[in-house]
Image: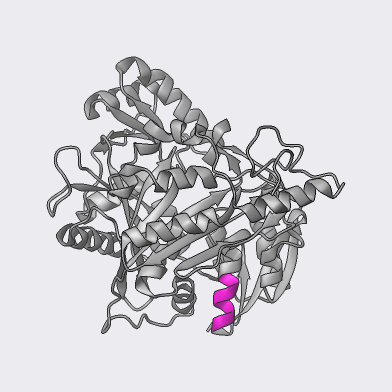
Amino acid sequence: MIKRLLIANRGEIAVRIARACRELGVESVAVYSDADEHAPHVVAADRAIGIGPAAARDSYLSISNIVRAAGTMKADAVHPGYGFLSENPAFAEACEQAGLIFVGPPSSVIARMGSKIEARRLMQSAGVPVVPGEAPDDQSDDGLRRAVDRVGLPALIKASAGGGGKGMRRIVAASEIAEAVQGARREAALAFGDGTLYVERLIARPHHVEVQILADHHGHIVHLFERECSVQRRYQKVIEESPSPILTSGLRRRMTDAAVQAATAVGYRNAGTIEFLLDRSSAPAGDGTPFHFLEMNTRLQVEHPVTEEVTGLDLVRAQLIVASGEPLQWDTHPPTQRGHAIEARVYAEDPAREFLPQAGRVLLYREPRAPGIRIDSGIAEGSDVSVHYDPLLAKVIASAESRELARLRLIAALRDFPILGVRTNIPFLLRILEHPRFLFGDIDTAFLDNEGSSLADADPVQPPAFVLAVMAAADNSGEPSAVDSRRGWDPWQQSRDWRS
Protein backbone atom coordinates (compact mmCIF):
# COMPACT_ATOMS: atom_id res chain seq x y z
CA MET A 1 0.00 0.00 0.00
CA ILE A 2 1.12 3.58 -0.65
CA LYS A 3 2.77 4.95 2.50
CA ARG A 4 3.18 8.68 1.82
CA LEU A 5 1.31 10.53 -0.93
CA LEU A 6 2.20 13.96 -2.30
CA ILE A 7 -0.91 15.82 -3.51
CA ALA A 8 0.15 17.85 -6.54
CA ASN A 9 -2.80 20.22 -6.42
CA ARG A 10 -4.64 22.76 -4.29
CA GLY A 11 -8.17 23.77 -3.23
CA GLU A 12 -11.08 21.45 -2.68
CA ILE A 13 -9.64 18.47 -4.57
CA ALA A 14 -6.49 18.54 -2.43
CA VAL A 15 -8.65 18.57 0.72
CA ARG A 16 -10.70 15.71 -0.72
CA ILE A 17 -7.61 13.59 -1.42
CA ALA A 18 -6.16 14.27 2.04
CA ARG A 19 -9.39 13.03 3.60
CA ALA A 20 -9.24 9.76 1.64
CA CYS A 21 -5.61 9.31 2.68
CA ARG A 22 -6.51 9.70 6.33
CA GLU A 23 -9.17 6.98 6.09
CA LEU A 24 -6.66 4.59 4.51
CA GLY A 25 -3.84 5.40 6.92
CA VAL A 26 -1.77 6.95 4.13
CA GLU A 27 0.31 9.96 5.14
CA SER A 28 -0.52 13.00 2.97
CA VAL A 29 1.78 15.81 1.85
CA ALA A 30 0.35 19.10 0.58
CA VAL A 31 2.19 21.42 -1.76
CA TYR A 32 1.60 25.14 -1.71
CA SER A 33 2.62 28.29 -3.53
CA ASP A 34 3.53 31.49 -1.73
CA ALA A 35 -0.13 32.57 -2.07
CA ASP A 36 -1.41 29.36 -0.44
CA GLU A 37 0.84 28.96 2.59
CA HIS A 38 -2.11 29.10 5.00
CA ALA A 39 -4.77 27.64 2.70
CA PRO A 40 -7.20 24.97 3.99
CA HIS A 41 -5.64 22.22 1.87
CA VAL A 42 -2.31 22.81 3.64
CA VAL A 43 -3.96 22.43 7.03
CA ALA A 44 -5.85 19.31 5.88
CA ALA A 45 -2.67 17.38 5.06
CA ASP A 46 -0.26 15.71 7.49
CA ARG A 47 2.75 17.52 6.03
CA ALA A 48 3.30 20.41 3.64
CA ILE A 49 6.06 21.86 1.46
CA GLY A 50 6.33 25.05 -0.55
CA ILE A 51 6.91 24.76 -4.30
CA GLY A 52 7.33 28.33 -5.52
CA PRO A 53 5.78 31.73 -6.21
CA ALA A 54 2.06 32.44 -6.56
CA ALA A 55 2.00 32.20 -10.35
CA ALA A 56 0.88 28.67 -11.29
CA ARG A 57 3.57 28.29 -13.94
CA ASP A 58 6.21 28.66 -11.22
CA SER A 59 4.54 26.36 -8.69
CA TYR A 60 1.61 24.06 -9.43
CA LEU A 61 2.59 23.76 -13.12
CA SER A 62 6.29 23.24 -12.45
CA ILE A 63 7.09 19.56 -13.00
CA SER A 64 10.62 19.91 -11.64
CA ASN A 65 9.48 21.69 -8.47
CA ILE A 66 6.82 19.09 -7.68
CA VAL A 67 9.02 16.06 -8.37
CA ARG A 68 11.77 17.65 -6.27
CA ALA A 69 9.27 18.24 -3.45
CA ALA A 70 8.19 14.60 -3.58
CA GLY A 71 11.82 13.54 -3.22
CA THR A 72 12.44 15.95 -0.36
CA MET A 73 9.40 14.69 1.53
CA LYS A 74 10.26 11.04 0.74
CA ALA A 75 6.83 10.44 -0.81
CA ASP A 76 6.35 7.20 -2.69
CA ALA A 77 3.34 8.36 -4.74
CA VAL A 78 1.84 11.46 -6.35
CA HIS A 79 -1.84 12.24 -6.92
CA PRO A 80 -2.34 14.98 -9.56
CA GLY A 81 -5.99 15.80 -8.74
CA TYR A 82 -7.61 17.53 -11.71
CA GLY A 83 -6.49 20.51 -13.76
CA PHE A 84 -2.88 21.74 -13.58
CA LEU A 85 -0.62 18.77 -14.51
CA SER A 86 -3.22 16.01 -14.18
CA GLU A 87 -3.34 15.20 -17.90
CA ASN A 88 0.23 16.12 -18.74
CA PRO A 89 2.07 13.00 -19.98
CA ALA A 90 5.45 14.62 -19.29
CA PHE A 91 4.52 14.96 -15.61
CA ALA A 92 3.36 11.35 -15.35
CA GLU A 93 6.55 10.22 -17.07
CA ALA A 94 8.71 12.35 -14.75
CA CYS A 95 7.03 10.71 -11.76
CA GLU A 96 7.61 7.25 -13.24
CA GLN A 97 11.28 8.01 -13.90
CA ALA A 98 11.70 9.28 -10.34
CA GLY A 99 10.36 5.99 -9.00
CA LEU A 100 7.09 7.55 -7.84
CA ILE A 101 3.71 5.88 -8.17
CA PHE A 102 1.53 8.13 -10.35
CA VAL A 103 -2.09 7.84 -9.22
CA GLY A 104 -3.57 7.71 -12.70
CA PRO A 105 -3.03 5.94 -16.01
CA PRO A 106 0.43 5.33 -17.51
CA SER A 107 2.05 8.32 -19.24
CA SER A 108 1.75 6.52 -22.59
CA VAL A 109 -2.04 6.32 -22.22
CA ILE A 110 -2.28 10.00 -21.24
CA ALA A 111 -0.23 10.91 -24.33
CA ARG A 112 -2.42 8.85 -26.67
CA MET A 113 -5.67 10.18 -25.27
CA GLY A 114 -4.32 13.73 -25.04
CA SER A 115 -4.32 13.87 -28.81
CA LYS A 116 -7.96 14.12 -29.83
CA ILE A 117 -7.02 12.98 -33.33
CA GLU A 118 -5.22 9.89 -32.03
CA ALA A 119 -8.12 9.18 -29.66
CA ARG A 120 -10.63 9.35 -32.55
CA ARG A 121 -8.61 6.91 -34.63
CA LEU A 122 -8.19 4.51 -31.74
CA MET A 123 -11.91 4.55 -30.90
CA GLN A 124 -12.83 4.01 -34.54
CA SER A 125 -10.55 0.98 -34.75
CA ALA A 126 -12.10 -0.36 -31.51
CA GLY A 127 -15.63 -0.05 -32.91
CA VAL A 128 -16.66 2.80 -30.60
CA PRO A 129 -18.89 5.30 -32.48
CA VAL A 130 -17.26 8.71 -33.00
CA VAL A 131 -18.64 12.02 -34.21
CA PRO A 132 -18.41 12.11 -38.04
CA GLY A 133 -15.40 14.18 -38.99
CA GLU A 134 -11.95 14.29 -40.51
CA ALA A 135 -8.39 14.88 -39.32
CA PRO A 136 -6.58 16.03 -42.49
CA ASP A 137 -2.85 15.47 -42.97
CA ASP A 138 -2.82 18.80 -44.82
CA GLN A 139 -3.01 21.29 -41.95
CA SER A 140 -2.89 24.37 -44.18
CA ASP A 141 -5.85 26.76 -44.34
CA ASP A 142 -6.83 25.29 -47.71
CA GLY A 143 -6.46 21.72 -46.42
CA LEU A 144 -8.77 22.39 -43.50
CA ARG A 145 -11.23 24.21 -45.75
CA ARG A 146 -11.44 21.14 -47.96
CA ALA A 147 -11.98 18.97 -44.87
CA VAL A 148 -14.88 21.21 -43.80
CA ASP A 149 -16.35 20.90 -47.30
CA ARG A 150 -16.20 17.10 -47.07
CA VAL A 151 -17.65 16.92 -43.54
CA GLY A 152 -20.36 19.47 -44.34
CA LEU A 153 -21.83 22.43 -42.49
CA PRO A 154 -22.50 23.18 -39.70
CA ALA A 155 -19.14 22.00 -38.38
CA LEU A 156 -16.67 22.44 -35.54
CA ILE A 157 -12.99 23.19 -35.89
CA LYS A 158 -11.25 21.63 -32.87
CA ALA A 159 -7.71 21.51 -31.48
CA SER A 160 -6.14 18.07 -31.34
CA ALA A 161 -4.55 18.90 -27.99
CA GLY A 162 -7.60 20.86 -26.84
CA GLY A 163 -9.79 20.97 -23.82
CA GLY A 164 -12.15 23.35 -22.06
CA GLY A 165 -13.34 24.84 -25.36
CA LYS A 166 -9.95 26.31 -26.24
CA GLY A 167 -8.98 26.05 -29.89
CA MET A 168 -12.59 25.39 -30.90
CA ARG A 169 -14.68 27.33 -33.40
CA ARG A 170 -18.20 26.81 -34.71
CA ILE A 171 -18.75 27.20 -38.46
CA VAL A 172 -22.24 27.73 -39.83
CA ALA A 173 -21.49 29.47 -43.16
CA ALA A 174 -18.68 28.94 -45.68
CA SER A 175 -17.62 32.56 -45.27
CA GLU A 176 -16.63 31.80 -41.65
CA ILE A 177 -14.15 29.01 -42.44
CA ALA A 178 -10.96 31.01 -42.93
CA GLU A 179 -11.36 33.11 -39.80
CA ALA A 180 -12.39 30.08 -37.72
CA VAL A 181 -9.37 28.03 -38.82
CA GLN A 182 -6.89 30.83 -38.16
CA GLY A 183 -8.46 31.75 -34.81
CA ALA A 184 -8.59 28.14 -33.59
CA ARG A 185 -4.98 27.53 -34.63
CA ARG A 186 -3.70 30.63 -32.83
CA GLU A 187 -5.61 29.81 -29.66
CA ALA A 188 -4.54 26.15 -29.68
CA ALA A 189 -0.87 27.03 -30.21
CA LEU A 190 -0.98 29.55 -27.37
CA ALA A 191 -2.85 27.29 -24.93
CA PHE A 192 -1.28 23.91 -25.72
CA GLY A 193 1.81 24.58 -27.83
CA ASP A 194 0.19 22.58 -30.64
CA GLY A 195 -1.85 24.16 -33.44
CA THR A 196 -2.98 20.86 -35.02
CA LEU A 197 -6.70 20.96 -35.89
CA TYR A 198 -9.42 18.60 -37.01
CA VAL A 199 -13.03 18.93 -38.17
CA GLU A 200 -16.21 17.41 -36.75
CA ARG A 201 -19.80 17.65 -37.81
CA LEU A 202 -21.74 19.92 -35.48
CA ILE A 203 -24.52 17.95 -33.80
CA ALA A 204 -27.50 20.17 -33.12
CA ARG A 205 -28.54 20.37 -29.45
CA PRO A 206 -26.83 17.20 -28.16
CA HIS A 207 -26.79 15.94 -24.61
CA HIS A 208 -23.38 15.57 -22.99
CA VAL A 209 -23.30 12.27 -21.10
CA GLU A 210 -20.13 10.81 -19.61
CA VAL A 211 -19.40 7.40 -18.12
CA GLN A 212 -17.10 6.88 -15.13
CA ILE A 213 -14.75 3.91 -15.49
CA LEU A 214 -12.19 2.33 -13.18
CA ALA A 215 -9.53 -0.20 -14.18
CA ASP A 216 -6.95 -2.06 -12.12
CA HIS A 217 -3.65 -3.75 -13.04
CA HIS A 218 -5.22 -7.22 -13.08
CA GLY A 219 -7.42 -6.86 -16.16
CA HIS A 220 -10.57 -5.71 -14.37
CA ILE A 221 -12.44 -2.76 -15.89
CA VAL A 222 -15.79 -1.61 -14.51
CA HIS A 223 -18.10 1.29 -15.22
CA LEU A 224 -19.73 3.30 -12.46
CA PHE A 225 -22.67 4.48 -14.56
CA GLU A 226 -23.19 7.87 -16.16
CA ARG A 227 -23.36 11.57 -15.40
CA GLU A 228 -25.48 14.13 -17.26
CA CYS A 229 -23.31 17.20 -17.96
CA SER A 230 -25.34 19.17 -20.51
CA VAL A 231 -25.67 22.31 -18.36
CA GLN A 232 -22.50 23.94 -19.57
CA ARG A 233 -21.33 27.35 -20.65
CA ARG A 234 -18.69 27.68 -23.37
CA TYR A 235 -17.91 23.98 -22.95
CA GLN A 236 -17.39 24.38 -19.18
CA LYS A 237 -19.74 22.34 -17.00
CA VAL A 238 -21.92 24.18 -14.47
CA ILE A 239 -24.32 21.57 -13.05
CA GLU A 240 -23.98 17.79 -13.24
CA GLU A 241 -26.20 14.94 -12.13
CA SER A 242 -26.51 11.18 -11.98
CA PRO A 243 -28.31 9.28 -13.27
CA SER A 244 -29.05 11.08 -16.53
CA PRO A 245 -32.78 11.95 -16.63
CA ILE A 246 -33.05 11.06 -20.32
CA LEU A 247 -31.44 7.61 -20.56
CA THR A 248 -33.47 4.46 -20.91
CA SER A 249 -32.09 1.27 -19.40
CA GLY A 250 -31.23 -0.02 -22.88
CA LEU A 251 -29.40 3.16 -23.90
CA ARG A 252 -27.53 3.19 -20.58
CA ARG A 253 -26.38 -0.36 -21.22
CA ARG A 254 -25.15 0.51 -24.71
CA MET A 255 -23.24 3.59 -23.53
CA THR A 256 -21.61 1.94 -20.52
CA ASP A 257 -20.61 -1.06 -22.65
CA ALA A 258 -19.02 1.34 -25.15
CA ALA A 259 -17.13 3.09 -22.35
CA VAL A 260 -15.67 -0.19 -21.08
CA GLN A 261 -14.80 -1.10 -24.67
CA ALA A 262 -12.98 2.23 -25.09
CA ALA A 263 -11.02 1.79 -21.85
CA THR A 264 -10.06 -1.75 -22.85
CA ALA A 265 -8.84 -0.62 -26.26
CA VAL A 266 -6.38 1.88 -24.78
CA GLY A 267 -5.16 -0.36 -21.95
CA TYR A 268 -6.51 2.01 -19.33
CA ARG A 269 -5.60 1.99 -15.63
CA ASN A 270 -7.09 3.81 -12.63
CA ALA A 271 -10.07 6.23 -12.79
CA GLY A 272 -11.12 7.90 -16.03
CA THR A 273 -14.12 9.20 -17.89
CA ILE A 274 -15.44 8.48 -21.37
CA GLU A 275 -17.46 11.41 -22.69
CA PHE A 276 -20.22 11.02 -25.28
CA LEU A 277 -22.55 13.27 -27.23
CA LEU A 278 -26.08 11.91 -27.37
CA ASP A 279 -27.76 12.92 -30.63
CA ARG A 280 -31.47 13.61 -30.11
CA SER A 281 -31.84 15.78 -33.22
CA SER A 282 -33.91 13.21 -35.08
CA ALA A 283 -35.99 11.63 -32.29
CA PRO A 284 -36.48 11.61 -28.50
CA ALA A 285 -34.04 9.53 -26.50
CA GLY A 286 -34.72 5.82 -26.70
CA ASP A 287 -32.79 2.56 -26.65
CA GLY A 288 -31.61 3.15 -30.22
CA THR A 289 -30.68 6.83 -29.94
CA PRO A 290 -27.26 7.41 -31.57
CA PHE A 291 -24.34 8.56 -29.45
CA HIS A 292 -20.75 9.42 -30.32
CA PHE A 293 -17.41 9.31 -28.50
CA LEU A 294 -16.25 12.83 -27.68
CA GLU A 295 -13.08 12.37 -25.62
CA MET A 296 -11.48 10.49 -22.76
CA ASN A 297 -10.49 12.33 -19.57
CA THR A 298 -7.51 10.53 -18.09
CA ARG A 299 -8.03 11.78 -14.53
CA LEU A 300 -10.55 12.24 -11.76
CA GLN A 301 -13.33 14.64 -12.76
CA VAL A 302 -14.56 17.69 -10.85
CA GLU A 303 -18.03 16.14 -10.81
CA HIS A 304 -16.99 12.75 -9.36
CA PRO A 305 -19.02 13.33 -6.13
CA VAL A 306 -22.36 12.69 -7.88
CA THR A 307 -21.13 9.24 -8.85
CA GLU A 308 -19.99 8.62 -5.29
CA GLU A 309 -23.39 9.65 -3.93
CA VAL A 310 -25.39 7.30 -6.19
CA THR A 311 -23.03 4.31 -5.87
CA GLY A 312 -21.88 4.68 -2.25
CA LEU A 313 -18.25 4.30 -3.39
CA ASP A 314 -15.22 6.46 -2.61
CA LEU A 315 -13.49 7.03 -5.94
CA VAL A 316 -10.35 8.57 -4.48
CA ARG A 317 -9.96 5.64 -2.10
CA ALA A 318 -10.40 3.30 -5.08
CA GLN A 319 -7.76 5.24 -7.01
CA LEU A 320 -5.23 4.80 -4.22
CA ILE A 321 -5.98 1.09 -3.86
CA VAL A 322 -5.61 0.51 -7.60
CA ALA A 323 -2.40 2.57 -7.74
CA SER A 324 -1.02 0.38 -4.94
CA GLY A 325 -1.43 -2.62 -7.24
CA GLU A 326 -4.39 -4.19 -5.52
CA PRO A 327 -7.27 -5.64 -7.58
CA LEU A 328 -10.79 -4.27 -7.70
CA GLN A 329 -13.20 -6.24 -5.53
CA TRP A 330 -16.36 -5.51 -7.50
CA ASP A 331 -16.47 -8.50 -9.86
CA THR A 332 -18.79 -10.57 -7.70
CA HIS A 333 -20.81 -7.61 -6.42
CA PRO A 334 -20.97 -5.00 -9.22
CA PRO A 335 -21.79 -1.41 -8.15
CA THR A 336 -25.40 -0.30 -8.46
CA GLN A 337 -27.14 3.05 -8.77
CA ARG A 338 -29.37 4.28 -5.98
CA GLY A 339 -31.36 7.50 -5.84
CA HIS A 340 -30.26 10.71 -7.52
CA ALA A 341 -27.50 13.29 -7.00
CA ILE A 342 -26.99 16.79 -8.43
CA GLU A 343 -23.88 18.95 -8.13
CA ALA A 344 -23.58 22.73 -8.57
CA ARG A 345 -20.23 24.48 -8.86
CA VAL A 346 -19.99 27.69 -6.84
CA TYR A 347 -17.53 30.13 -8.42
CA ALA A 348 -16.21 33.54 -7.45
CA GLU A 349 -17.44 35.24 -10.61
CA ASP A 350 -19.88 37.90 -11.75
CA PRO A 351 -22.42 36.42 -14.19
CA ALA A 352 -23.79 39.90 -15.00
CA ARG A 353 -20.34 40.96 -16.24
CA GLU A 354 -19.62 38.10 -18.64
CA PHE A 355 -18.77 35.82 -15.70
CA LEU A 356 -15.75 37.92 -14.81
CA PRO A 357 -13.64 36.05 -12.20
CA GLN A 358 -13.56 37.74 -8.81
CA ALA A 359 -10.71 38.06 -6.33
CA GLY A 360 -10.55 39.23 -2.73
CA ARG A 361 -10.89 38.09 0.84
CA VAL A 362 -13.82 35.90 1.91
CA LEU A 363 -15.35 37.91 4.78
CA LEU A 364 -18.18 35.52 5.59
CA TYR A 365 -18.46 31.84 4.68
CA ARG A 366 -21.16 29.59 6.16
CA GLU A 367 -21.71 26.15 4.64
CA PRO A 368 -25.28 24.83 4.78
CA ARG A 369 -25.96 21.76 6.90
CA ALA A 370 -28.93 19.59 5.98
CA PRO A 371 -29.79 15.96 5.22
CA GLY A 372 -28.53 14.85 1.84
CA ILE A 373 -26.17 17.83 1.40
CA ARG A 374 -22.42 17.47 0.86
CA ILE A 375 -20.00 20.38 0.46
CA ASP A 376 -16.57 19.91 -1.10
CA SER A 377 -14.66 23.13 -0.49
CA GLY A 378 -11.12 24.45 -0.43
CA ILE A 379 -11.74 27.80 1.23
CA ALA A 380 -12.66 29.09 4.68
CA GLU A 381 -13.70 32.37 6.22
CA GLY A 382 -10.76 34.74 5.82
CA SER A 383 -9.36 32.91 2.78
CA ASP A 384 -8.04 34.99 -0.09
CA VAL A 385 -9.41 34.19 -3.53
CA SER A 386 -6.39 34.73 -5.77
CA VAL A 387 -6.23 36.00 -9.34
CA HIS A 388 -3.70 33.27 -10.05
CA TYR A 389 -6.02 30.24 -9.91
CA ASP A 390 -9.39 28.93 -11.00
CA PRO A 391 -12.13 30.74 -8.99
CA LEU A 392 -13.96 27.57 -7.91
CA LEU A 393 -14.96 28.05 -4.27
CA ALA A 394 -17.02 24.97 -3.50
CA LYS A 395 -19.14 22.19 -4.90
CA VAL A 396 -22.59 21.66 -3.42
CA ILE A 397 -23.94 18.14 -3.91
CA ALA A 398 -27.50 17.15 -3.04
CA SER A 399 -28.64 13.53 -2.99
CA ALA A 400 -32.07 12.01 -2.41
CA GLU A 401 -34.29 9.11 -3.39
CA SER A 402 -35.68 11.08 -6.37
CA ARG A 403 -34.41 13.72 -8.78
CA GLU A 404 -37.02 16.24 -7.71
CA LEU A 405 -36.15 15.94 -4.04
CA ALA A 406 -32.44 16.25 -4.85
CA ARG A 407 -33.21 19.39 -6.89
CA LEU A 408 -35.22 20.94 -4.05
CA ARG A 409 -32.52 20.08 -1.52
CA LEU A 410 -29.87 21.70 -3.70
CA ILE A 411 -31.96 24.86 -4.10
CA ALA A 412 -32.49 25.06 -0.33
CA ALA A 413 -28.77 24.55 0.34
CA LEU A 414 -27.70 27.24 -2.13
CA ARG A 415 -30.18 29.70 -0.60
CA ASP A 416 -28.64 28.98 2.79
CA PHE A 417 -25.01 29.42 1.66
CA PRO A 418 -23.90 33.00 2.44
CA ILE A 419 -20.53 34.04 1.02
CA LEU A 420 -19.47 37.67 1.43
CA GLY A 421 -16.42 39.53 0.18
CA VAL A 422 -16.46 38.17 -3.37
CA ARG A 423 -19.36 38.00 -5.75
CA THR A 424 -20.50 34.46 -6.57
CA ASN A 425 -22.64 32.73 -9.17
CA ILE A 426 -25.14 31.34 -6.62
CA PRO A 427 -28.11 33.41 -7.90
CA PHE A 428 -27.31 32.19 -11.44
CA LEU A 429 -27.26 28.56 -10.27
CA LEU A 430 -30.61 28.98 -8.55
CA ARG A 431 -32.24 30.32 -11.71
CA ILE A 432 -31.00 27.31 -13.67
CA LEU A 433 -32.29 24.84 -11.08
CA GLU A 434 -35.70 26.57 -11.05
CA HIS A 435 -36.00 26.82 -14.83
CA PRO A 436 -38.86 24.75 -16.31
CA ARG A 437 -36.51 22.97 -18.73
CA PHE A 438 -34.25 21.80 -15.92
CA LEU A 439 -37.30 20.78 -13.91
CA PHE A 440 -38.26 18.35 -16.72
CA GLY A 441 -34.69 17.25 -17.49
CA ASP A 442 -34.83 18.80 -20.94
CA ILE A 443 -31.44 20.52 -20.95
CA ASP A 444 -29.09 20.16 -23.92
CA THR A 445 -25.66 21.71 -24.42
CA ALA A 446 -27.17 24.73 -26.20
CA PHE A 447 -29.36 25.71 -23.24
CA LEU A 448 -27.02 28.26 -21.66
CA ASP A 449 -25.91 29.53 -25.07
CA ASN A 450 -29.51 30.49 -25.73
CA GLU A 451 -30.73 31.49 -22.27
CA GLY A 452 -27.59 32.11 -20.23
CA SER A 453 -27.59 35.88 -20.72
CA SER A 454 -31.12 36.35 -19.39
CA LEU A 455 -30.37 34.08 -16.42
CA ALA A 456 -27.15 35.96 -15.66
CA ASP A 457 -28.71 39.43 -15.88
CA ALA A 458 -31.74 38.78 -13.68
CA ASP A 459 -32.02 40.59 -10.33
CA PRO A 460 -30.07 38.85 -7.55
CA VAL A 461 -31.89 36.94 -4.86
CA GLN A 462 -32.19 38.51 -1.42
CA PRO A 463 -30.04 36.80 1.23
CA PRO A 464 -31.50 35.46 4.47
CA ALA A 465 -32.20 37.90 7.30
CA PHE A 466 -29.25 36.77 9.41
CA VAL A 467 -26.87 37.62 6.55
CA LEU A 468 -28.36 41.12 6.36
CA ALA A 469 -27.78 41.43 10.10
CA VAL A 470 -24.11 40.49 9.68
CA MET A 471 -23.77 43.01 6.87
CA ALA A 472 -25.39 45.73 8.97
CA ALA A 473 -23.10 44.92 11.90
CA ALA A 474 -20.08 45.13 9.63
CA ASP A 475 -21.26 48.51 8.34
CA ASN A 476 -21.75 49.83 11.91
CA SER A 477 -18.40 48.60 13.16
CA GLY A 478 -16.51 51.55 11.76
CA GLU A 479 -14.03 49.21 10.09
CA PRO A 480 -13.41 49.50 6.35
CA SER A 481 -15.01 46.64 4.45
CA ALA A 482 -14.20 45.15 1.08
CA VAL A 483 -17.92 44.58 0.70
CA ASP A 484 -18.72 48.30 0.87
CA SER A 485 -16.35 49.12 -1.95
CA ARG A 486 -18.25 46.99 -4.45
CA ARG A 487 -20.47 48.76 -6.90
CA GLY A 488 -24.02 47.74 -7.59
CA TRP A 489 -26.89 47.05 -5.24
CA ASP A 490 -26.50 43.27 -4.96
CA PRO A 491 -27.13 42.65 -1.22
CA TRP A 492 -24.59 39.82 -1.26
CA GLN A 493 -21.91 42.42 -1.97
CA GLN A 494 -23.31 45.61 -0.41
CA SER A 495 -23.79 46.36 3.27
CA ARG A 496 -24.84 49.98 2.91
CA ASP A 497 -28.60 50.65 3.00
CA TRP A 498 -29.31 47.07 4.11
CA ARG A 499 -30.35 46.71 7.70
CA SER A 500 -31.83 43.81 9.61
| Res 207 quadrant in image | top left
State yes or no: residue 122 in magenta.
no
- Span colored in magenta: 17-23
Residue 20 vs residue 49, the one in the foreground: 20
Q: Residue at x 74, y 67 (%)?
A: 49
Q: x, y percentage for residue 218?
A: 34, 79
Number of marks in the image? Answer: 0
Give the residue displayed 28% in from the left and 33% down from the top: 202
Name the foreground residue: 398 vs 150.
398
User: Can residue 438 be spotted in the picture?
Assistant: yes
Q: Main secondary structure of the magenta part?
A: helix
List x then y, in percent, for residue 124: 23, 49
Residue 255 on image: x %, y %? 23, 58
- Place residue 81 in its image quadrant: bottom right
Give left or right: position of 92 versus 218: right
Question: Compared with residue 164, is residue 99 higher up or lower down, i.e. above or below?
Answer: below
Can you name the residue that lies furthest to the front here? 500
Q: Among all residues in the image, which is located at the extreme top?
A: 175
Is 482 situated left or right of 434 in this image? right
Which residue is most to the right? 478
In this rendering, the answer to whether 404 lies above or below 235 is below
Q: Locate residue 369 relative to residue 246 in the image: left or right.
A: right
In the depicted structure, whether residue 254 falls above or below residue 388: below
Q: Nearer the viewer, residue 242 or 299?
A: 242
